[in-house]
Amino acid sequence: MQEKLRQHIEKIVPLTDEEFAFVRSHFTVKNAKKKSFLFQTGESVRYSYFVVSGLLTLIYHDDTGKQHIVSFAMEDWWESDYEAYFTQTRAGMSLQCLEDTEVYCLTLENYRKLCAGLQKMEHFFLQKANGGHIGSQRRILSFLTSNAKQRYEQLLQRYPALLQRVSKTLLASYLGVSRETLSRLGHTS
Amino acid sequence: MQEKLRQHIEKIVPLTDEEFAFVRSHFTVKNAKKKSFLFQTGESVRYSYFVVSGLLTLIYHDDTGKQHIVSFAMEDWWESDYEAYFTQTRAGMSLQCLEDTEVYCLTLENYRKLCAGLQKMEHFFLQKANGGHIGSQRRILSFLTSNAKQRYEQLLQRYPALLQRVSKTLLASYLGVSRETLSRLGHTS
């Protein structure tokens, strides 16, 4: 699984073996079972997670106890409650495994050490942050301009594999529609 | 106005006079009149903009010609169509001045040169990108979990100054509600 992390980083910056050993030494590995939580609302958020295999979902519970799916993260994606992670405050959301999941874990302290110790890694994280920002802008735009059917079709087009792995209930929550509305949109699997 | 850019950067990384001169040399300055566009949909996006004074808004026009306000940017904020900027594709949105506006302009080439030439600046942009990502996540969450009234109140609480400077029509578009709905929410100015 080390190779997956290295390949992922080398899509953006090439690393020597020594450099990768330095990078690798800043991560710990965790294997988490389906349905378990990496953190829950109110807990401290110690890590940013790189998904080696499996599937995570970031969940927000509103005041009425209703669950909202903020995002999904599958192989090669990074996920955390980044506000809580970067500001070292308590989690406003929960991060749950939808499948047995293997992750690389990076503390904020080690994130900073990596950036300071190897400019290539600061460059790597800047590219990922810019990419994440673009993705979020796209999603904001889809809320402003698209109805549920269009949002469903955009998701289908962009991440067809994801739709095979996620329940209808979670998918409806991610799209911000009811389970019944989703069924009418043609998600019949 | 140089001081504003320097102060803004030095909130995150301290700079020597030489370093700031290096940074400054990568920017150009532009003064744009109220209602003018820094770029429009379909044009190339040459710059990321740092607002020294004034107010910008990023606008998306949907297929029916309807206008959606994606974001506002006032003093000390950065704005652009970042997908178009970073991928060097045509603008999917337009960036308009809501007031006479003074901006520092940074090409992607100079952004890269700054990052490569001075690690402090790569660090600075990483902090800004992470902050932008957190802000976008917050807005996504507000679309998923809050109704128009709540979104209006969140905006009022977070950016009270902005609401004094933006028309009701634009504000309604930003919140994703009709002008009539906004009036019912108590925006009577």
Image: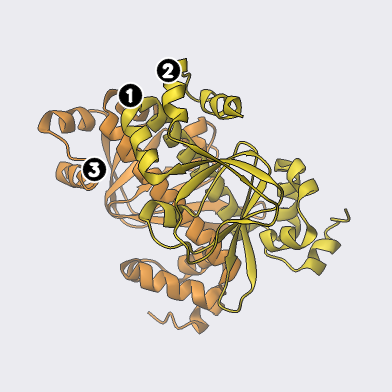
Chain colours: A orange, B yellow
Label 1: few (<14), some (14–19) or many (≥20) C-alpha neighbours in 10 Å: some
Could you say where residue A76 lies in the image, as x and y percent from the top left?
Answer: 28, 51
The residue pinned by badge 1 equals A116
Residue at image point 49% right, 82% down: A185
User: Gap in Å between the C-alphas at discs 3 and 2?
Assistant: 33 Å
**Res. B18 mark:** 2
Q: Which secondary structure lies at badge 1? A: helix
Q: Which secondary structure lies at badge 2? A: helix
Image: B149 above or below A154: above
Could you say where residue B7 lies in the image, as x and y percent from the top left?
Answer: 57, 24
User: Gap in Å between the C-alphas at discs 1 and 3?
Assistant: 17 Å
Could you say where residue B88 lies in the image, as x and y percent from the top left?
Answer: 37, 56
Residue at image point 49% right, 46% down: B48
- Depth check, mark 1 against mark 2: the one in front is 2
Q: Residue furthest right?
A: B188
User: Gap in Å between the C-alphas at discs 1 and 2?
Assistant: 21 Å
